[in-house]
Image (tube, rainbow, N blue to C red):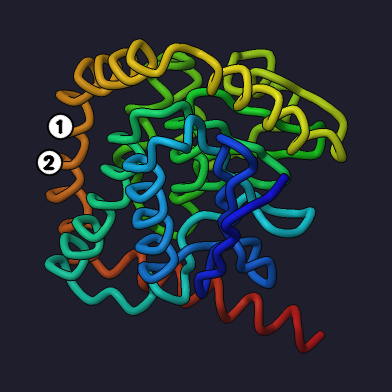
């Protein structure tokens, strides 16, 4: 059953017995997120974390093409100068903290592309379910944006060599590769993704809640030094990147190329 359905501006959320589902709801742009959307997601996660009737959470995207395309470049192109780059980075801390502080199992139902920061969020989930058409990766370099947290998250999961290659090329991985290297736990038919995610979430929701909470807390503590180091490095990296003007120029070119394709 679905009860307590909520509609925010940029997400949908509902509870199905003891499992909560958050759906990113900007399908017109492959669910790419901006600051207001991230704030809604963080607020909903904090609410579910405090609700004893919620025992597991699923993240998914609206539509059939995108889990989330990552950062909405319409927002990022407005960032000005090195200090603007630092402020932009710091605007993400509360969002990531809401994910990392969740003391209930978090399942990603990957219904489409997960790129950039959305790839990072998927990697922060405990279990990932996808179908054969899903693609995931770290393409920020193509927009002139250096990766900070992405390399840390990939290093711990797939090792140095592949992390370097994916970060420097911006290559998107197909679902089969993601499954082979352990980034996707369950590869199912396209119409079975949410159902499988719900099956996994209910399995996890049935586990003893105190042990679940303590396990989740322990994993956060183990990864906290690397997370904080990534944030600190990100400040200097984004300051230099945006101070150089390269991200702004790359995004201007992206939008100009897109406009040209629409006219032709």
Whole-percent x and y of residue 201? 60, 27
Q: Position of residue 109 (x, y in %)?
A: 65, 37
Helix, strand or loop for disc 2: helix
Nearer to the camera, 115 or 111: 111
Q: Secondary structure at mark 1?
A: helix
Pointers 2 and 1 in contact (C-beta within 8 Å) = yes
Q: Residue at x 55, y 43 (%)?
A: 20
Residue 202 place in picture, x, y as percent: 62, 24
Compared with residue 215, is residue 237 higher up or lower down, i.e. above or below? below
Quadrant of the rendering where the N terminus is positioned: top right
Residue in front for this viewpoint, 245 or 139: 139
Residue 206 lies in quadrant: top right
Disc 1: which residue:
229
Q: Nearer the viewer, residue 7 or 260?
A: 7
Q: Residue at x 71, y 24 (%)?
A: 199
- Residue found at x 47% / y 69%: 73
Q: CA distance from mark 2 to mark 1?
A: 5 Å
The residue that mark 2 highlights is: 232
């Amino acid at each position: 059953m679905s009860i307590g359905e909520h509609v925010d501006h940029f997400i949908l959320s509902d509870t199905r017995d003891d499992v909560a589902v958050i759906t990113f709801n900007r399908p017109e742009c492959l669910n790419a997120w901006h600051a207001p959307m991230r704030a809604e997601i963080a607020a909903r996660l904090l609410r579910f974390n405090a609700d004893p009737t919620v025992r597991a959470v699923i993240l998914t995207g609206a539509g059939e093409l995108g889990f989330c395309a990552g950062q909405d470049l319409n927002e990022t192109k407005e960032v000005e100068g090195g200090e603007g780059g630092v402020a932009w980075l710091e605007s993400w801390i509360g969002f990531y903290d809401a994910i990392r502080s969740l003391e209930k199992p978090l399942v990603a139902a990957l219904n489409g592309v997960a790129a950039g920061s959305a790839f990072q969020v998927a990697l922060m989930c405990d279990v990932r379910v996808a179908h054969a058409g899903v693609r995931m990766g770290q393409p920020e370099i193509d927009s002139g944006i250096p990766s900070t947290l992405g390399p840390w998250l990939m290093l711990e999961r797939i090792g140095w060599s592949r992390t370097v290659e994916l970060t420097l090329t911006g290559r998107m991985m197909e679902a089969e590769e993601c499954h082979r290297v352990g980034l996707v736990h369950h590869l199912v038919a396209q119409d079975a993704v949410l159902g499988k995610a719900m099956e996994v979430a209910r399995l996890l929701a049935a586990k003893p809640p105190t042990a679940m909470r303590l396990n989740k807390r322990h994993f956060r503590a183990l990864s906290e030094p690397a997370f904080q180091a990534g944030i600190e490095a990100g400040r200097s990296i984004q300051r230099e990147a945006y101070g150089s003007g390269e991200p702004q120029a790359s995004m201007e070119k992206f939008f100009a190329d897109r406009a040209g394709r629409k006219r032709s």
